[in-house]
Image (spheres, rainbow, N blue to C red):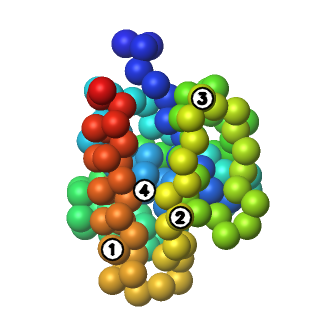
Amino acid sequence: MNNDKPKVAFICVHNSCRSQIAEALGKLYAKETFESYSAGTELKSQINQDAVRLMKKLYGIDMEKTQHSKLLTDIPPVDIVITMGCNVECPYLPCKYKEDWGLDDPTGKSDEEFIKVINEIDKKILELKEKLKH
């Protein structure tokens, strides 16, 4: 495996929704460009069930089979940190580059709100892939 690829961590407090979606889409679109990880500062017992259901429906990805809730200490050192928009103090990880995507947490909201956030993550993953290719 090519170890020259940058490692990207998508982080938010709970690692159950937005960061998990970003990890899944990073693996789907950009596995040739960067390695995707997600993590948080608190563990949830399971990935957000609306996120799981909608990712299955929209992309055919079963996040419960391929991913789980992870703490920041559970992932390898990374080059790039993407915070999801924590509305509180975002978790800190040492890295070479960091950006905040400022996404609202769709937990408990309608499918339409969820899909808006998933579409935004989709777009941002593709932008990040382009950025890192150059």
| Residue 17 visible in rendering | no
Judge from the rendering whether residue 74 lies leftward or rightward of residue 68; answer left or right.
right
Residue holding disc 2: 102
Which residue is label 3 attached to? 96
Residue type indicated by callout 3: Lys
Q: Which numbered disc, 1 or 3, marks the residue closer to the eye?
A: 3
Name above or below for residue 56 compared with residue 11.
below
Secondary element type, mark 1: helix
* Badge 1 density bin: few <14, some 14–19, many ≥20, Cα 10 Å: some
For the residues bearing labels 1 and 4, Cβ distance under 8 angstroms: no
Q: Which amino acid does label 1 sit on?
A: Ile
Q: In front of the other: label 2 or label 1? A: 2
Q: Are marks 2 and 4 in contact (CB under 8 Å)?
A: no
Which amino acid, mark 4?
Ile
Q: Position of residue 30 (x, y in %)?
A: 30, 36
**At numbered mark 3, what does the secondary structure look like: helix, strand or loop?**
loop
Residue drawn at x 30%, y 28% as measured from the top left: 133
Q: Can residue 122 be seen in this view?
A: yes
Residue 41 image position (x, y, % from top left): 73, 52
